[in-house]
Image (cartoon, rainbow, N blue to C red):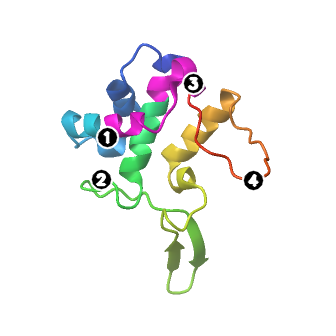
């Protein structure tokens, strides 16, 4: 389904479509996370896909370690090591990860959406860069 399929829907409606693992969570709780997520997503970067971006960010926050996990969500941080005999999997914590969004599928989808909008490039600078521009 293309991002255009989500246009005209509220972030809550989009969240319900993309994050079935949180079906048991109340709309009120999800709206709280959507409000939080909207502080971290710039509308100028996502254009008409802003609702999808907010829903993805909210799902990412909820699925991240330390997020909402009342329903038994199995999302975790990035896998840093695996072992087969006597099964051992090590996950990074959010503070250990240099890329916070890579910790969940939702975060990776948000990064892919940003790249699709042509905003996935970075600039190399000398010295300190202060502040972030959100247009």
Instruction: Kindly identify which numbered label has been placed on residue 127.
Output: 4
N-terminal label among 2 and 4:
2
Residue shown at 50%/18% (left/top)?
5
Q: Which mark is in front, 1 or 3? A: 3
- Residue in the foreground of this view, choosing between 133 and 47: 133
Q: Which residue is mark 2?
A: 68
Q: Quick one: SS at disc 2?
A: loop
N-terminal label among 1 and 3:
1
Quadrant of the image occupied by residue 85: bottom right
Instruction: Kindly identify which numbered label has been placed on residue 44.
Output: none
Q: Which residue is mark 1?
A: 33
Q: Are marks 1 and 2 in contact (CB under 8 Å)?
A: yes
- Answer yes or no: is residue 3 visible: no
Residue 37 image position (x, y, % from top left)? 40, 38
Residue 44 image position (x, y, % from top left)? 57, 23
N-terminal label among 1 and 2:
1
In the rendered image, residue 8 lying in the magenta stretch gets the answer: no
Q: Is residue 126 above or below residue 135?
A: below
Residue shown at 32%/28% (left/top)?
12
Residue shown at 56%/67% (left/top)?
79
In the rendered image, residue 36 lying in the magenta stretch gets the answer: yes
Q: Are marks 2 and 4 in contact (CB under 8 Å)?
A: no
N-terminal label among 2 and 3:
2
Q: Are marks 2 and 3 in contact (CB under 8 Å)?
A: no
Q: How many marks?
A: 4
* Quadrant, the N terminus: top right
Alpha carbon separation for disc pair 1 and 3: 22 Å
Q: Which residues are magenta?
A: 34-52
């Amino acid at each position: 389904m293309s991002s255009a399929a989500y246009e005209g829907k509220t972030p809550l409606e989009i969240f319900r479509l993309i994050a079935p693992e949180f079906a048991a969570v109340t709309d009120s709780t999800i709206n709280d996370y959507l409000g939080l997520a909207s502080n971290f997503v710039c509308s100028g970067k996502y254009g008409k896909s802003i609702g999808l971006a907010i829903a993805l960010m909210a799902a990412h926050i909820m699925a991240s370690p330390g997020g909402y996990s009342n329903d038994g969500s199995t999302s975790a941080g990035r896998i840093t090591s695996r072992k087969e005999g006597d099964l051992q999997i090590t996950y990074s914590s959010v503070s250990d990860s240099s890329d916070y969004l890579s910790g969940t599928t939702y975060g990776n989808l948000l990064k892919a959406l940003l790249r699709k909008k042509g905003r996935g490039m970075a600039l190399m600078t000398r010295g300190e860069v202060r502040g972030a521009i959100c247009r």
